[in-house]
Image: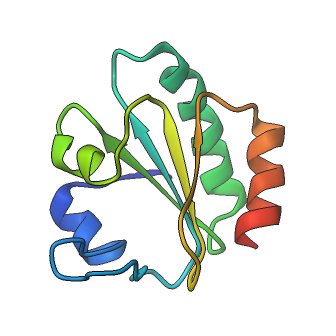
Amino acid sequence: MTEHLTKKDFKEKIFDYEKEKSWKYNGELPCIIDFYADWCGPCKMVSPILDELSKEYKGKIKIYKINTETEQELASAFDIMSIPTILFIAPGKEPRGIKGALPKSKFEELIKEWLL
């Protein structure tokens, strides 16, 4: 299942941007982070796809969601200007982002290419 992150969770599980000067992913498994808002139509289209992927890739990839309305500081820390914005993070690599709603097939392609 997808997991919702607060600022505190994010700093523990992903990256402590207040302490670290350069990017350092804290997780062991690759992850996908969905920056969304409840009122966003395209975000609502992506949500069930991410839920499916979280089941299909259980134990291989973590999938997180960040509500940009309640976690505005996290959104601004990553210069999130449009939603949905999806970050793909592989251990030891810089995060890569995509803006907009993607079909499941594109998520699967990017998971294979960027994360696994």
- The residue under the point 73% across, 46% down is 107
Q: Is residue 5 left or right of residue 104?
A: left
Image quarter hosting the C terminus: bottom right
Observer-nearest of 80 and 12 = 80
Observer-nearest of 30 and 72 = 72
Question: What is the x, y in percent for residue 103?
Answer: 75, 31
* Quarter of the image where one finds residue 88: bottom right
Question: What is the x, y in percent for residue 69?
Answer: 21, 31
Residue 42, compared with residue 73, is above or below; it is above
- The residue under the point 49% across, 39% down is 85
* Quarter of the image where one finds residue 57: bottom right
Question: What is the x, y in percent for residue 39?
Answer: 34, 15
Residue 38, compared with residue 92, is above or below; it is above
- The residue under the point 56% across, 82% down is 91
* Quarter of the image where one finds residue 56: bottom right
Observer-nearest of 72 and 53 = 72
Q: What's the coloring here?
A: rainbow
